[in-house]
Image: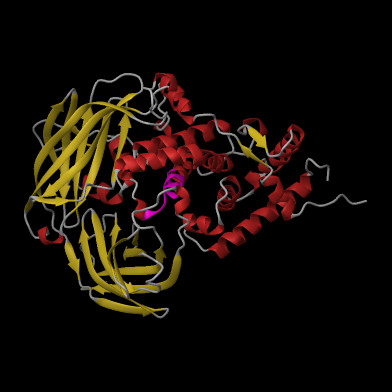
Amino acid sequence: MDAKQYTTHDVEDMLRAGHFQPPTDLRPVLHQERQTNRPPLSRLAAVAGIGLVIVALIAGGTAIALSTQEQAATRVDYGVKAVYEARLIHPVEESQSVNGILLGVDWVYADWNQVLVAYTAHGQVEGDWRVEADVVSAAINGRTVDPPIYSMGFIETGTQSNIATLDLPADLRNTDSIDVEVVLDAAVVNYYTPRDQLPEGMSPLDVLRTGGGEATFTLNIPVTPGRVLEAGKTVESNGYTVTLDDVVLAPSMTTADLCFDVPDPVTYLDWHALTTFSAGRITAIGDTSTPYEVGSTVSCTHVKFRYGIPLDRDRYVLTVNELYGSEIPPGGPLTTDDLPIEDIRVRGPWKFVLTD
Amino acid sequence: MNAHRKRDLLNDWYHNGVTALYNYVAYRVGDATCANEIAAAACQRAFERIDQYDPRRGNLNAWIFGIARNLIRDHFRAQAGQPAPLSLEDLPPIAGRGKTPEEQTINAERFRTVVRLLDRLTEQEREVVALRYGSDFKYREIAAALDTSTDHVGVILHRALNKLRDALNEEGGPDGR
């Protein structure tokens, strides 16, 4: 008699019959890893390019030593890598000491799309204590701008290095230089305090913070020019119209502003565009776009391409492959269950060919 | 959303969501040491960078799974793109579902029997199976995570289950079929 054969339903039942058991608390795993002098991220980071960003300044000159780790770090963002390798960045030697933490700005860069500020915080700490610093506020030419939501870097026990990014306001593009003020907030933190050593009332995952404080840096940064491409074009596909309002090419990033018909203005609060930008054989994929105008029938969104697209080409192609709307509760999600994001998707493509 | 609110959210997530994350990672890498390290690294990175989490770009769970996915990709890159063959000895500890110890033991064995075959799947198929059965993602959540359609997710999942079924029928399972 033939043996009974498994069905796909059996397979599903078997997959649902059990699960893998995580360690009771993943944090001791981290703790143990560090005690063996093998930072858990080190091997991964070396491959990922999220490496240590410590900019070694060569005293008295503008030359910058690019270590393997630094080059790896710039792989996180191909636009940053491009300006880094093209030596368009400007070394800075400014540092301030705040309650035992040395905060320093290592280099800066600005172009028509963004401002980069590379900084390092360093302190003498032991065990699980680490030094951290974040940009808590920033101003360009006296005008407050949003603190960076995108930054990269790496933390090791006593040093944190980061490259913070700020959007350059459009009306400052044609200036030779800008004055940037950044406020860094540094602290010594401990993510991994053993449960039995936590102050009463603290959650095991609360972060202990001590020391540090704020330091303000005022930086004059030359603006590297970019290029504005002819835009204002409209393309229709699949019954929807997309208008390309603006394309700005700059050495560290290209940006595009798009406006389009809103397929469902009632239900969907945020509309985004999945977009690529090509120059010859180079194709850059856009970040998740940021809606900047939400109307009842038309929505506009800002797309960033974090690549060093060459500025000197005579033909570029921007393709909107898809529009999608996401329903997000006002004020953001309250719990992780709050956000079964119901996307509505409209396939394109909407293709814009931009020539001189 | 301020930094404290984000950290509260992350604390809540850790207590409720870390098992799903761990299972996703374990399904993908199949090795206890790597799963521990990658899941821990993903949590560490999430806690270190929670200030950078932007709710407008997606929910917290998706953000953390995105971190884990990148770490897994890096892990495979370090292995020259080839996931190592699964070894029963290296699998993370397994728990069977059920009301009685006997039922749990049987179910743990059934689970072990099928997950040891995950290396028969392509990386894409294993990703979808990991999200679906390891982390209990819905089709549309998988589609959003992989930037594809729910129909495509269904096709990939169907193909993956067929492969696992065929592998089970070739090798025989715990039921002695």
Residue at 40% across, 34% down: B44
Using residue B94 as the reference point, say whether residue A193 is left or right of it.
Answer: left
Which residue is farthest front? A201
Residue A89 can be seen, yes or no: no
Find residue B70 and report its horizontal and vertical position in percent: 44, 45
Quarter location, residue A255: bottom left
Q: Against A313, is A189 above or below? A: above
Prevailing secondary structure of the magenta residues: helix
Magenta residues span B57-67
Find residue A160 and report its horizontal and vertical position in percent: 27, 32
Question: A326 or A219, which lies in front?
Answer: A326
Question: A340 or A47, which lies in front?
Answer: A340
Mark count: 0
Q: Against A4, is A345 above or below? A: below
Using residue A78 as the reference point, say whether residue B65 is left or right of it.
Answer: right
Question: A331 or A184, which lies in front?
Answer: A331
- Please check the rendered image and state whether residue B64 is part of the magenta-colored stretch, yes or no: yes
- Please check the rendered image and state whether residue B175 is part of the magenta-colored stretch, yes or no: no
Residue at 33% across, 54% down: A331
Q: Against A347, is B113 above or below? A: above
Residue A117 can be seen, yes or no: yes
Question: A55 or A117, which lies in front?
Answer: A117
Quarter location, residue B114: top right
Which residue is farthest right? A1
Find residue B122 and report its horizontal and vertical position in percent: 59, 51
Find residue A290 and report its horizontal and vertical position in percent: 30, 60
Using residue B74 as the reference point, say whether residue B94 is left or right of it.
Answer: right
